[in-house]
Image (cartoon, rainbow, N blue to C red):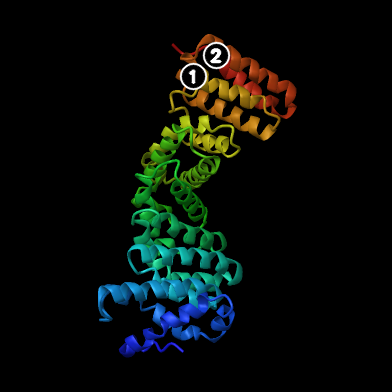
Amino acid sequence: GINAEYGDLNSALSSLPTVLHLLTSRPLSQHALAVVNMDQLCDVLTMVPSIQSGETGLGSPGLVEETLSTLLSMSEICLPHMDLEQAIPTLGQLCRCQGDYRGAAVQLCVRTTERAVHVLEPARLSSLYSQHVLPVIQEMLLETPPLPTLALRIVLPLLSVTPELALEEHGIVTALVELMKDVDPVEGLCLLILETLAVFMSNSNVDFSWLYTLGVHEQLSLLVLKLGVNPDVGEATVLAAIKCLSSLLNYIMGVVKKALQTKSKSSGEDVLRRSQCVVNTCGVLLVWYHYTSAPPALLSITQLYGGQYQDFLTPYNVDIFTESLKNEDDNRIKTTLKILKRIMTTDPGLLKSMIVSTKEQLNKAVIAVKTTSPTLVPLSDEVLKLLQSKPVA
C-alpha cells in the first residue's frame, strides 16, 4: 500500500516507481489497479503542489522532478478508475501545481469532467466542483495558452447541466470579460468564451447590473464588431455571439418595460444610455442577417433605439432586407417589416438619404409580400405608406 502520512513522505513515495511499473505492464495492469489503495493514492496526489514548491523538503530538484513525473503518470492511469467523489477533490489540488505539470493535471480534469457530467446528479456535481475545482479556474483563465481553453472545457460542460453554477463567486466571469479584450476572433478560445457567457447570461437569476459594472455590454459589443469584419469566423462563434447579445438586449428591454409600467423614467433612460454601444452592432447583425437569430436581435435594437444606426437603408443593407422579404418564413418577413417600419418611423431622415433606385427596389419587395404573405398585408401597407411618403425637407 501507499502510506501518505506527511511526516513519512520519503517512505510513502519510495514504492511509487514499482507501482507505476506494475500499472504500465500489460499483463499485470488490471491486477495492479485492483490492489492499489485509491484513498492513499489520493492523499499522495493532493500533496503534489507542496512537493513541487519544496515545502515537503523531499530532496534534490532531480528527485522532485522524478517524483512528480511518476505521480502524474500514476494519476493518468488511476483517475479514470477512481470514484468521482475521490477524483474531483484530488484534481482540484493537482490543478494547483505549476508549469507543464499543471497542464497535464488540467487535461486530466477535462477528461474527468466529461465523465462526471454524465454520472453525477447536477446538485452533487455543482457542489464538488464549486468546492474543489472552480476556485482555481480564474487563475487558469489568466494563464498562457492552452490553459484558458482547457479551463473553459471544464466550465462549459458543467454549465450545460448546472446552468445556475455560481461562476461569479469564483471570479470566472471577471476573467472572461478580461479575456474578451484581446482574444483572437478565429481561435477556439473565442468560441468557448462566448458559449460560456451565452449559457451564463441566459440564466434568469443572473445579476445584469453586476455584469454592467464589469463592462460586459461594452466588451461584447466590441467583440461582435471584431467578429463581423473577420471572414474566417466560424458559424458556431457567430451564433454564440448573437445569443449573448440577445440575452443582453432582453435585459435592457425588461428594464425599459418595467420603467414604463412604473413610470420610473430615470431607470429606463439610464440603462438605454449605458447600453448605447449595442447600436454599433447593427451593421454586423445585418451581415449576419441570414442566421435565424440575427433579425430578432436587430429588431430589439431598433425597438430600443429606433433608427439611430444611420446606414440602415444604404444600397447594401437594402439588398439584405429585400432578400429577407423573399423568404418563405412569414415570421422572418414579419420581423424585417417591423424593423423597416420602426427605423423609418423614428428617423424619417433615413428615407431622405435613400437613392431613388434603392427605394424603388425596397418598394417592389414589400408589394410582393402582399401577394405571397396575405396575413402580413396590414403591416406591408404601413411600410409602403412610409416608403411612399415625401420626406420632410
Residue 15: image quadrant is: bottom left
**In the orientation shown, which residue stands out farthest toward the top?**
356
Q: Which residue is mark 2?
A: 358
Asked if residue 305 shows in the view, the reply is: no
Residue 56 in percent (x, y) is at 28, 81
Q: Residue at x 38, y 47 (%)?
A: 180
Q: Nearer the viewer, residue 163 or 196?
A: 196
Task: Determine the secondary structure under disc 2.
Answer: helix
Q: Nearer the viewer, residue 23 or 68?
A: 23
Q: Which residue is mark 1?
A: 314
Asked if residue 208 shows in the view, the reply is: yes
Q: Amino acid at mark 2?
A: Thr
Q: Nearer the viewer, residue 229 or 69?
A: 69
Q: Alpha carbon of mark 2 to alpha carbon of mark 1: how far? A: 8 Å
Residue 94 in percent (x, y) is at 39, 72
Residue 16 in percent (x, y) is at 42, 82
Q: Is residue 168 above or below residue 321?
A: below
Disc 1 residue crowd, few under 14, some 14–19, many 20+, Cα 10 Å: some
Residue 10: image quadrant is: bottom left
Q: Is residue 240 above or below residue 325?
A: below
Residue 314 in percent (x, y) is at 49, 19
Q: Quadrant of the C terminus?
A: top left
- Tell whether label 1 touches label 2 (CB within 8 Å): yes
Q: Residue at x 57, y 24 (%)?
A: 320
Q: Amino acid at mark 1?
A: Thr
